[in-house]
Structure formats: C-alpha cells, structure tokens
Amino acid sequence: MQDVAVAPQDVGSVVPGLAERVWINAQEAPQVVQFVRPAPVHRAWPGRAPVQGGDVPVTCEQFRDDVLTLARGFIAAGVGHGDRIALMSRTRYEWTLVDYALWAIGAVTVPVYETASRDQLEWIVADAGAVGCVVENAAHAEMLTDARAGLPALREVWQIDDGDLIALAGQGRDIDDARVETRRKQVTGGDVATIVYTSGTTGRPKGCVLTHRNIYCDVTSAVTVLPQLLHSGASTVLFLPLAHAFARMIQVGMVQTRGTMVHSAEMVGVLEQLRRYRPTFILAVPRVWEKVYTRARQKAEDAHRGWLFAVADWVAERHSRAMDTARGPNLVLRLARQVLDLLAYRKLRAALGGRCRMAIVGGAPLGERLGHFFRGAGITVLEGYGLTETSPALTTNRPEAQRIGTVGLPFPGVEIRIADDGEIQARGEVIFPGYWNNPDATRATFTSDGWLRTGDLGSVDADGFLRVTGRTKEIIVTAAGKNVAPPPIEEAVRAHPLVSQCVLVGDGRPYVAALVTIDEPAWQRWRTRHGHPDASVADLRDDATLRREIQTAVDRANEAVSHPEQVKTFRILPRDLTEADGELTPTLKVKRDVVAQRYADDIEVLYRGH
C-alpha cells in the first residue's frame, strides 16, 4: 500500500464561519472591487441607484452591505440556524450573494444545477428538507409549483428574475443589524455550510454535507499552494456552474483573497467574456480546453494556415516535454518557440484575454497532449484532483512543481494512500462528515480505519505526485478478463478534430469497441469539403470516407496501449451527446449508464456475429 502526506498548516482550533471574511474585507479594504456584474443591470438593490448599460463594480464594502441586507430579509422570513435553503440558478452575482447571506445567519445552502429536471429538483428539496428555495426564473418556479404537494417542509419560493430577492431584502428593513451580527458570531467551523448533491453519472444524487471548517481548510490550502493565482489583484471569469463544488471553491477563494470575480452565466460565448474582462487566470473542465484547442486549429485551417498550426502544435509539445528534462529545451526548440510565439501562441493567449498565463483544470483528466500543448504555448494549465466529498480539492500541480499527466501533490494536511486494489483513499480535515440522511452510504464510503474511499484508481510516484488511472466502476473487464481503463484511450481518440466524444464499451464482451460522436463545427467543414453540404451525421455515419477519417483517430489511440486494450471497431452515433438530453453532467462528463442504455442497439451492432 502506497501513501503520501503533506504536513498540515495551522488554521487554528477555532475556525470562523465563511461569511466572516466578508466583514473583514469590508473593514480592511472597503474600496477593493470584489465582483463585476456584467451589463445590463435592470433592477436596483435597495439603497443603490439603478445602473443601465454598463458593468457594475461591487466593492468589498458594497458586497458586505448587500449580504447584510439580504441576511436581514432571510431572518424576517423565519430562516433559522441550520435551516436548509435550496438555490437553483445559473452562475451570477445573486448566486454568491444568497450563498453568503445564508452563511451569515448560520443557514445551509443546498445548490441545485439550473439544468436539473423536475424530478431531480423535487428529490433534492425533499431529501434536504429545505424550508425555502431561491430559483432563477419562472420555469424553475413552475417546477416547484407542480411538485409542491410532495414538499411539506417548503414554505417559501423566491424567484430572482421576478425581483423576489429585492422584495425579501425590503422585508428585512425592520430587522436590526445586531441580529445578523449575533447570528454570524454563533456560526462555528463545525456547522454545516452546504449540502451538495452529487450530479453523478449513475443513480440518485447523494447529499454531501460540508462544514464551514471543511471548506475553510480546503480554500486556505489552495491559497497557500497557489499564491500566483489566488491573491489580491487576481481576477477571473467564472463560467462553470456554482452548484459544482470546484467552482464554489474558487468563489470562496476569491472572497478570501479579495480577488475580482466576474460571473458568466453561459459557457457559450465565454471567449468574448475572456477577451472583454482579461482575467489573470481561469477555471475550466477539460472539455473546455479541448474545444479551445480544436477551435484554434479550425480557425487556422479556415485561413489556409493549417500547416502553421501543425508546426506550432509540434513545437509547443516538444518544448514543454523538454522542460521536464535535466537539459531543458535545446537551442533549436527555443528559437522555434520564439518565432511561433509571434506567429501563433500570442494569438491563442489573446483569445483568452491576453493576461491569462495560468489556469486550473479539474473534474476529469486533461491528458498529457493538451497539458504540454498549452504550456508550450505559454499557458500553464494546472491539473488537480478531488471530489465533492473532499470540499473538493485533494491535490494539485503547482507552478513550481508540475508534472503533466499527474494531478499533482496533496494539499497541506491531506493524506493520500493507494489501497492494494489500486483505489485512491484520502484522509484530512477537508473530508466531509457524511451523506445527508444516508448513514448506509456514509459507512460504505469510509474504510474501517477512517479513510475515504474515492472510487478512483491511481498510483503515487517516488516524488509524491498522484496519477489517476480510472474509476473503479468504469473499468471495463472483457470476456477474457482483461481490465481496461477507458479515459486515456478516449482522450486520444478525442484528439482528432472531427471527434467530439468517445465512449468505450466492452464489459463482458470479447473485445473493446467505441461509440464516437462528431463535433458539429468540424462536421460543417468536413461535409462541405467532401461534397455533402446538406448532409447530417445520421445520413453519413456509415460513409466509407468518414469512417476512414475516424479510423485514423482510433489507430493513433491504439498505438499507445496493449493489444487486448485496443479498440477493435467503432460506431458513429447519429448526433452528439448533450447535457439537455441527460447524457452529460453539468460539467460535461459522460453519463455512461445513460449512453449504454440509450444506444444499446448501436452497441449490439458492434458485437454482431460474436
């Protein structure tokens, strides 16, 4: 059994509630801009003049006042210490405002993805026993209206777009500020801060209970090991859903360090947001980086400069890999990179705003190819690892200690060990106390000696860097008994510009096969170039020319694995996988069980005759 630990940092025996930092910031740096609210803003917060047509900066002092005002409203509405309030919205300023207002009075935020179905929303609100729910729009409110009969604890529903938070703040006018102060001071590190229901790729979501101390310790560790990212003067555009624990950690980290955060409600159009606000770092899941890479290549090809991108790609990867050797990049590589920085890499960085030289990635494996490409192009993408159950981060690469292909070193105070069966297990103050209303699941997720079972497989190298190799539940065991970890092979197939998703199948089957989807923007170019300007993927998925193109991606992926692990055949699906159709999680991970069920007939075609 392997294990590795990093010495804990002293956060003190008494940890304050997370909202305490809001009051500290307002006192110590009242005029520092904490948030930027993108235009247009139509409604004025009580005591604030309405602003139209421009971005609205929110200083530390203004944020404290907004949190205080809304906290008084929640008290007026009868929200007590420990009461659960569900929050269903896209990423926006009001999300963060509600979160901190609830924390300021000792209430518990229960995030719900804004893409959740009525059944999912009803399950989470009912299981958490939420007494209130903040929703973004009328469609969300309607889902709750339809489900109200099954939610006896639910007393109030507030709709952001209908001005209900402003009205709620108005209801709190008669509540003395001292009541908020008293409630805030009563919050301790051991109090529950949030119950985060795992989006999951299988089964009913479970509510992960996270305390103020859990989150405080994790964010404090992140600030310690990533001071180049999380500091006063840093800025970021947050476009991941705040219902995801990874994005939530950045929210708390920016408040903790007085960085400036711009909320972006949509991943669509995010490049324009990045060019506009010029963040110093960004947070994204691997799928976003894949799309940035693919779009850059397609843009070059459209300008008849595909050859230049191919050279830039080759040089960036070779230069980055050479950085990890004792001798470093040779003179030819250094000169080539300098030339290509003028011709290509600067344009790529400009697309991210021009100031972003570092990024954090998590949620799924990034892959060595992309990690080396972006570092070679001048953007260091730091890959980390964790779970909702771990608040969420356990490990990360550091700018001064990066090993591409791994998820880095443990955070201070985190212990990692690899069990005899290869499972990654963890221990430390960032580990959650258990699942809400689910003692059986809680017992099952901890070992007899108190370590968290992550369900992931991995290894630790001699220097303590953790490498994640797959999920225990995702490992494919072929009929011949060969264990196959899908992620590395799938990532290699996705490297082809035509491929959007690749899902390996083969559990209990004679060989490994793949379901492949086609990237829509790349498809539009491909079909025109091959004389099918109006054809859909469904029309041509058995076309010999298209299949030869995808076969090249499969062949390239097969070169890196043993014969039993190789993909023997593949099936092109008639359309891409989407979150709207329930095939992807909100962080764009594939729901394998849904895909396997929905495309069972296509899978059978792959094994016909065997």
Image (cartoon, rainbow, N blue to C red):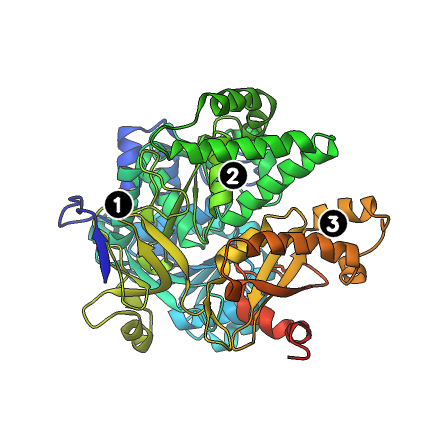
Taking depth in this image into account, of 578 and 7 the one nearest to the observer is: 7
Residue wearing tag 1:
463
Taking depth in this image into account, of 501 and 352 the one nearest to the observer is: 501
Taking depth in this image into account, of 486 and 358 the one nearest to the observer is: 486
Residue wearing tag 3:
523
Closer to the chain start, of discs 1 and 3, is: 1
Q: How crowded is mark 1: few (under 14 residues within 10 Å), some or many (20 or more)?
A: few
Tell me the SS state at disc 1.
Answer: loop
Tell me the SS state at disc 3.
Answer: helix
Q: Vertically, is 188 above or below 199?
A: above
Q: How crowded is mark 2: few (under 14 residues within 10 Å), some or many (20 or more)?
A: few
Amino acid type, residue under disc 3 in the picture: Trp
- Assess whether mark 2 and mark 3 are in contact (beta carbons under 8 angstroms): no
Q: Which residue lies furthest to the bottom in this view?
A: 609
Residue wearing tag 2:
44
Q: Identify the residue at image location x=59%, y=48%.
A: 495
Quadrant holding the N terminus: bottom left
Q: Which mark is residue 155?
A: none
Q: Identify the residue at image location x=55%, y=25%.
A: 346
Q: Vertically, is 118 above or below 172?
A: below
Residue mark closest to the camera, 1 vs 2: 1
Q: Which residue lies furthest to the front in this view?
A: 563
Residue mark closest to the camera, 3 vs 2: 3
Q: At which x and y percent is residue 130?
A: 40, 67
Amino acid type, residue under disc 2 in the picture: Ala
Amino acid type, residue under disc 1 in the picture: Asp
Is residue 258 visible to us here?
yes
Left or right: where does residue 11 sit relative to residue 91? left
Left or right: where does residue 33 sit relative to residue 524? left
